[in-house]
């Protein structure tokens, strides 16, 4: 298994990606055609930035990628249609992200793990629910979404909610994921609009952070 994982690490170095996670999105998009040329894409929890690299290539020069993370993302090497924002996604409004709905929302976000599978699974699912809350406001009708989740007791409910909000929602584990990893990706096509907006996480329970100052 170590040899397999070293393969993706070495390939990322050879092909100029910031991390081996790039191949997870490549495998997902090759299989499911989530991203199209000219799309406007939000990369949520983007650091270190390999998913934004892949997305920028796939949307082409007429598309746009907005990459958001609490951590600072190194701006080196990105084309001009990639915008970097250091911020807490939960504090942002759409007008701080360029003002236009997104065609695609991507998330490779995961909570800091504690070694408690049940607790880690709950926190991972909570991130997904928070992202679905934002997708209900920021994603265009017909848009697509990809988000990471840890398999566990909360996974079926996240998948169920996703199927209410989208025409299609399925779980998938790309071959670049570690075999022993509990991570899965929920791949959603065809956002239905208002159907999922009533199913939200209580914003009052979310910790508030300093608002973003704007584009990087």
Image: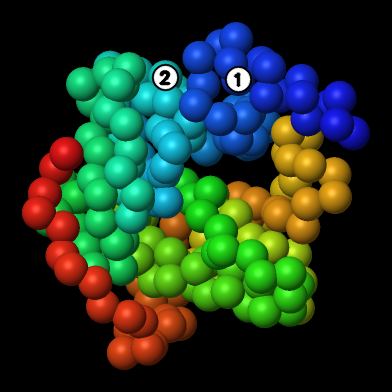
- Closer to the camera in the image, 104 or 210: 210
Residue reaching furthest top?
14
Residue at 14 percent of width and 42 percent of height:
215
Residue 10 quadrant: top right
Instruction: Find residue 122 and report its horizontal and vertical position in percent.
Output: 63, 77
Instruction: Find residue 72 and report its horizontal and vertical position in percent.
Output: 30, 43
Above/below status of 4 relative to 139: above
Is residue 60 in view? yes
Above/below status of 1 relative to 192: above
Helix, strand or loop for disc 2 = helix
Q: Is residue 205 left or right of residue 81?
A: right
Residue at 23 percent of width and 25 percent of height:
81
Is residue 168 in view? no
Q: Earlier in the sequence, mark 1 or mark 2?
A: 1
Above/below status of 198 relative to 210: below
Tell me whether circle 1 and circle 2 mark residues in contact (CB < 8 Å). no
Residue 59 quadrant: top left
What residue did someone put label 1 on? Answer: 12
Q: Is residue 137 left or right of residue 3?
A: left
Residue at 43 percent of width and 83 percent of height:
201
Residue at 74 percent of width and 40 percent of height:
177
Q: Is residue 188 left or right of residue 199?
A: right
Badge number at residue 57? 2
- Closer to the camera in the image, 190 or 207: 207
């Amino acid at each position: 298994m170590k040899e397999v994982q070293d393969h993706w690490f070495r390939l990322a170095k050879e092909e100029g990606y910031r991390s081996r996670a790039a191949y997870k999105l490549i495998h997902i998009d090759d299989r499911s055609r989530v991203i199209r040329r000219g799309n406007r894409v939000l990369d949520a929890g983007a650091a270190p930035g390999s998913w934004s690299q892949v997305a920028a290539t796939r949307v082409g020069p007429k598309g746009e990628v907005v990459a958001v993370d609490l951590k600072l993302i190194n701006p080196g090497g990105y084309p001009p249609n990639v915008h970097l924002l250091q911020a807490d996604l939960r504090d942002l409004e759409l007008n701080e992200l360029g003002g236009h709905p997104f065609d695609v929302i991507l998330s490779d976000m995961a909570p800091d793990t504690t070694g408690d599978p049940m607790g880690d699974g709950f926190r991972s699912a909570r991130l997904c629910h928070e992202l679905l809350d934002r997708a209900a406001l920021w994603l265009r009708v017909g848009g697509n979404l990809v988000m990471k989740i840890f398999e566990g007791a909360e996974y079926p409910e996240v998948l169920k909610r996703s199927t209410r909000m989208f025409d299609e929602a399925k779980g998938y584990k790309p071959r670049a994921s570690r075999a022993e990893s509990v991570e899965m990706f929920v791949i959603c096509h065809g956002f239905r609009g208002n159907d999922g907006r009533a199913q939200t996480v209580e914003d009052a329970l979310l910790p508030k952070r300093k608002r973003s100052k704007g584009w990087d």
